[in-house]
Amino acid sequence: MSGIRKIGFACDHAGFALKETLMAHVRGRGLDAVDYGAFSKGRVDYNEFGESACRAVRSGETDAAVLVCGTGMGMSITANKIAGIRCAAVSDPYTARMSRRHNNANALALGARVVGEEAAKMILDEWLDARFEPRHQPRLDKIVELEARERRA
């Protein structure tokens, strides 16, 4: 296990059903799931929910975030605007695993209109089970430096 024990979940209307399924899935694995919304299938913009889940990661309230919208792209773009968040939008188990092993991704974005329920569970399991390989830390340090330069720009 990767050390992820408490996961924040967020979605928009397109991702609501898949978010609910994935929250039940991680609870079945003995992990904690925190719901940051949306709380129904009613039309909403994903931004505020994705931001809340990612700010919880940054503050240490949760260990990671799983974000679900139609394609995963909007949530990923939103998440990656928050300093310290490394969100990977993925649609296959291999990319999910590598996002943790090489990039230490602390947020995962999934597209409910892109991957089916069973595929999403497999992707999430690969992501949760992967461990960061410290040999890649110098690259992450460069990302942190880039974030700092951009804040000053």
Image: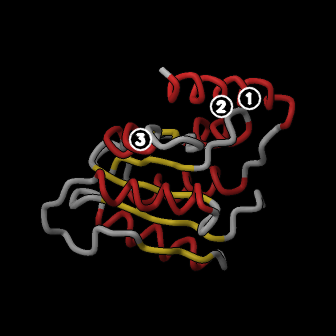
**Is 120 in front, or is 11?**
11
Numbered-mark total: 3
What secondary structure is found at the residue carrying circle 1?
helix
Kind of residue indicated by mark 3: Ser
* Residue, disc 1: 141
Kind of residue indicated by mark 2: Val
Whether residue 39 sits left or right of residue 7 in the image: it is: left
Residue 142: image quadrant is top right
What secondary structure is found at the residue carrying circle 2?
helix
Image location (x, y in percent) of residue 83: 54, 41
* Residue, disc 3: 76
Image location (x, y in percent) of residue 84: 59, 43
Seen at 48% across and 43% down, the residue is 82
Mark toward the start of the polypeptide (2 vs 3): 3
Image location (x, y in percent) of residue 119: 47, 52
Mark toward the start of the polypeptide (3 vs 1): 3
Whether residue 120 sits left or right of residue 85 in the image: it is: left
Seen at 46% across and 54% down, the residue is 120
- Compared to residue 127, the image places residue 71 above or below, namely above
Asked if the residue at tag 1 contacts the one at tag 2, i.e. Cβ–Cβ closer than 8 Å, the answer is yes
Front tag of 2 and 3 = 2
Q: CA distance from mark 2 to mark 3?
A: 17 Å
**Is 88 in front, or is 119?**
88
Residue at the front extreme of this rendering:
152
Residue 45: image quadrant is bottom left
Kind of residue indicated by mark 1: Asp
For the N terminus, the quadrant is bottom right
